[in-house]
Image (cartoon, coloured by chain):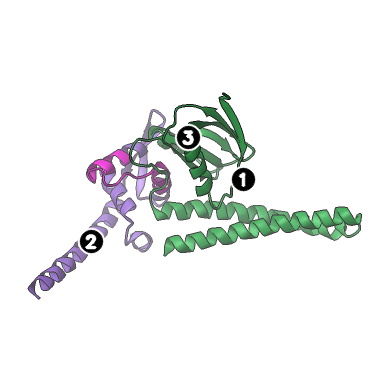
Amino acid sequence: MLAHMIDKYIPMTETAYLILLALFNENHGYGVILEVEKMTQGRIRIGPGTIYGTLSKMEEDGLIVAIRAENRRKIYKQTQMAAELMQVEIKRIGELYQYGLEWRLKNEQL
Amino acid sequence: MNNYKTQFFLWWGWNCEPFENHLESMASKGWILERSMLGHTRLFFKRAEPSKIRYCVDYQNDINLSGEYRHIMEDDQWQLINKLSGWYLWQKSYETQRPSIFTDKQSLIERNNRLLKFAIIIASAQIPLAIIVLSNAMQWAHQIGFLVYCFYGLFFGLMGYSIYSLIKQNRILKG
């Protein structure tokens, strides 16, 4: 199942990545918009249509689960599979960042 | 001075931007959309202070749609002007940054895919009826038969063009 999710989600879009980061703690859809905006210091404000579509797809794929409802709004949290998927993605991003640093160092030496 | 205005604005589901921009332009001139009818083509405006209002059209398959959709939209300060058979017309006032309901390519591709599915189903559902009607139309009076052929020609031409446009848009979005 994880292998299938890796094929489907990796490399992650910036939106999916930030949403899963934001759902480390439970939250509702609009709360995720605000959390991502806060995390990126106002650089990214995800649209509500995008959030709804992405959360629906992630819930269907088992990356997030609705743990309860508050004021008729679903409260989501990421699942264990999402946590494992994020580990894979963070490792991939880390490697790319390292390659970038090495490239920068080589260019500074020229 | 008249405080109300009605307009008829023809737009296409595969290209909502001209319609959205037209409503925004009207709002900036002091004409705020109050309601809409006939597939959001008949528009009723009320005079007000010129404002910055963003309008967005979305298509959702109502059968699968949960209440979460409206909650998330309304929590983000979007107001629903009207909903007609899965077509949602939303508005939101803004000051500096122009808002949008879709902020990444993937969600635009998915919206286009919903529209594509809708267009394919509608077109496919009409095929058996069109075959029956057109095969009988040859026996009808010349003018009526001609009109029926024109109607179906226009219908399938429009459906075909909308399907082609949506596929093309998705190809551009996918890069």
Mark 3 crowd level (few <14, some 14–19, many ≥20, 10 Å Cα): some
Q: Secondary structure at mark 2?
A: helix
Q: Main secondary structure of the magenta part?
A: helix
Q: Which chain is purple?
A: A
In depth, the one of A7 and A101 nearer the eye is A101
Mark number displayed over residue A93: 2
Residue A82 shows in the view: yes
Can you say whether B126 is above or below A102 in the image?
above
Disc 1 chain ID: B
Q: Which residue is mark 1?
A: B10
Can you say whether A82 is above or below B49 in the image?
below
Q: What is the magenta range?
A: A33-56
Residue A84 image position (x, y, % from top left): 27, 55
**C-beta proximity under 8 Å, tags 3 and 2:** no
* C-alpha gap between disc 3 and disc 2: 47 Å
In the image, residue B8 lies in the stretch drawn in magenta:
no
Residue farthest front in this picture: B1
